Image (spheres, rainbow, N blue to C red):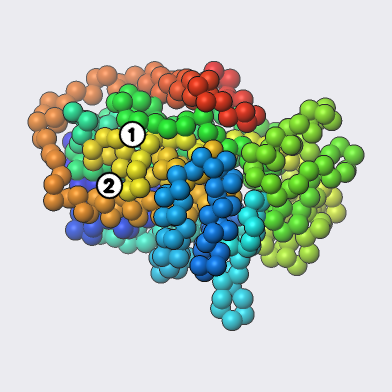
């Protein structure tokens, strides 16, 4: 048996930032299903939103609400926006660097459905810049233990109180963790889909475990399709994202006749619909995205990795359009949490893409994901610190704890994936989104 004060499941930006904000006198175990860097936080290209000043508050709030079809939790949206400057100060203190002008002031970019430039960025690898600096800071903490290739297969609970978790360790053995608090930062559900920008090991484990223990979920069918990923006939582990920022800086979408057919800066769900409709009309498997309207200097300065990937795939973005297609990208649904990231089970928290605090509503506004994850991860850590004096413990649960029912790992994996898929499909029947989604992987259907 493993004993820790706080167990954090996931090594993306929300899990790492939560660890950094938790009390320094508590022992923290942070686990990752893959290696520590294989989280979707690393893949975020565009940037992270920040409220520039109070004059932008109403506009930012309205942009977020409009993108979410006004199904957002207004208080959550306000918390996120008002907390943004504090989070950015923290990130800078950990060494994160964002584009600045010669006077040292932040430069901002604009993406789809934003009415103003309010997005900080680091080239086209903002997620990697933020998450790598958070990981380095966590590694420097003496109270944090990191374990890679370790999978949570269940939680330990009694009478709706969480006391720990069951893990499959890197060597394949099972073990149980006695923890005062558990924070689920397990990422999204892209591994359930045939085409996704997510890592394939992100299959909604936390959702399945929540279902198993009657922890409330919310809007699991709210799945965002990113309008523009690089189209290729080759099988890839994940789809390569062509950032929203590319269109924000002037790129246009073209049909098979190389004619513009839609507004490139409308919300992602509406743009994905427009692209899929055009593909059906044209009888094609993709549309085209032309980056040549972007000034050459800006193109090479802001999007070096996108340019390099396109070149690797045989396309020179300075001379020709590139093929793009929508793919599953982000999960707005998740484990239901309050404004401090508490789930409906005591001593169990959920943060990041795993959770649903209502910020995003039916559809996420571009570059709100990193910010939302960080804001509510910090709120979880602060709530844990406040609640610690009244923490509940039950050592008897771990006496002669049987791991027998977890021995068939493949059977359990399939059961978990199927339960999440069925929940998504049920929620879609009860509350149809009307958004055309990519087909989930045939092996899971």
Label 1 neighbour load within 10 Å: few <14, some 14-19, many 20+: many
Image quarter of residue 236: top right
* Mark 2–mark 1 distance (CA, rounded to whole Å): 12 Å
Q: Assign a secondary structure to mark 2.
A: strand
108 lies left or right of 308: left
| Residue 180 visible to the viewer | yes
Q: In which quadrant will I find the N terminus? A: top left
The residue lying toward the viewer, choosing from 79 and 107, is: 79
Residue pointed to by mark 1: 152
Whether 30 is drawn above or below 345: the answer is below
Between 77 and 7, which is closer to the camera in this rendering?
Answer: 77
Q: Residue at x 50, y 49 (%)?
A: 369
Q: Which residue is mark 2?
A: 29
Provide residue 401's location: percent of width, then percent of height. 16, 26
From the image, which quarter does the C terminus lie in? top right
Direction from residue 281 to residue 398 in the image, left or right? left
Among numbered discs 2 and 1, the one appearing first in the sequence:
2
Q: Position of residue 107 (x, y in %)?
A: 60, 69
Q: Residue at x 79, y 33 (%)?
A: 278
Q: Residue furthest bottom?
A: 103
Mark 2–mark 1 CB contact (< 8 Å): no
Give 387 or 231, whichever is nearer the viewer: 387
Looking at the picture, tell me which residue is in the foreground, 276 or 296.
276
The residue located at (23%, 60%) in the rendering is 24
């Amino acid at each position: 048996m493993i004993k820790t004060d706080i167990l954090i499941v996931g090594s993306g930006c929300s899990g790492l930032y939560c660890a950094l904000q938790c009390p320094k006198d508590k022992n923290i175990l942070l686990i990752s299903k893959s290696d520590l860097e294989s989280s979707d936080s690393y893949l975020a290209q565009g940037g992270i939103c920040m409220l520039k000043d109070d004059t932008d508050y109403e506009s930012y709030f309205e942009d977020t609400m409009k993108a979410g079809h006004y199904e957002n939790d207004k208080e959550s949206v306000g918390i996120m926006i008002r907390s943004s400057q504090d989070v950015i100060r923290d990130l800078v203190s950990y060494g994160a660097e964002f584009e600045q002008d010669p006077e040292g002031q932040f430069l901002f970019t604009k993406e789809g459905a934003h009415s103003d430039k309010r997005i900080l960025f680091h080239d086209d690898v903002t997620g990697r810049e933020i998450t790598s600096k958070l990981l380095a800071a966590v590694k420097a903490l003496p109270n944090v233990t990191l374990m890679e290739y370790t999978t949570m297969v269940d939680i330990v609970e009694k009478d709706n109180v969480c006391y720990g978790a069951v893990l499959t360790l890197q060597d394949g053995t099972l073990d149980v963790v006695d923890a005062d608090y558990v924070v689920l930062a397990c990422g999204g559900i892209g591994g359930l889909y045939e085409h996704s920008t997510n890592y394939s090991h992100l299959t909604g484990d936390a959702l399945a475990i929540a279902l198993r223990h009657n922890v409330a979920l919310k809007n699991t069918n709210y799945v965002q399709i990113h309008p523009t990923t690089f189209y290729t006939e080759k099988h890839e582990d994940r789809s390569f994202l062509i950032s929203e920022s590319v269109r924000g800086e002037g790129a246009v979408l073209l049909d098979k006749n190389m004619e513009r057919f839609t507004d490139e800066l409308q919300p992602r769900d509406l743009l994905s619909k427009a692209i899929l409709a055009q593909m059906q009309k044209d009888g094609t498997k993709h549309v085209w995205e032309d980056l040549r309207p972007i000034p050459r200097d800006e193109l090479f300065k802001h999007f070096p990795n996108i340019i390099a990937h396109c070149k690797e795939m045989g396309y020179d973005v300075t001379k020709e359009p590139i093929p793009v297609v929508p793919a599953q990208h982000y999960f707005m649904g998740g484990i239901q949490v309050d404004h401090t990231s508490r789930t409906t089970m005591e001593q169990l928290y959920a943060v990041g893409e795993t959770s649903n605090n209502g910020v995003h509503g039916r559809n996420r506004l571009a570059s709100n994901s990193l910010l939302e994850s960080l804001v509510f991860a910090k709120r979880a850590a602060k709530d844990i610190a406040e609640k610690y004096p009244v923490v509940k413990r039950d050592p008897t649960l771990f006496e002669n704890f049987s791991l027998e029912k977890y021995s068939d790992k493949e059977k359990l994996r399939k059961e978990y994936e199927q339960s999440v898929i069925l929940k998504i499909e049920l929620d879609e029947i009860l509350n149809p989104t009307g958004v055309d989604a990519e087909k989930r992987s045939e092996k899971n259907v």
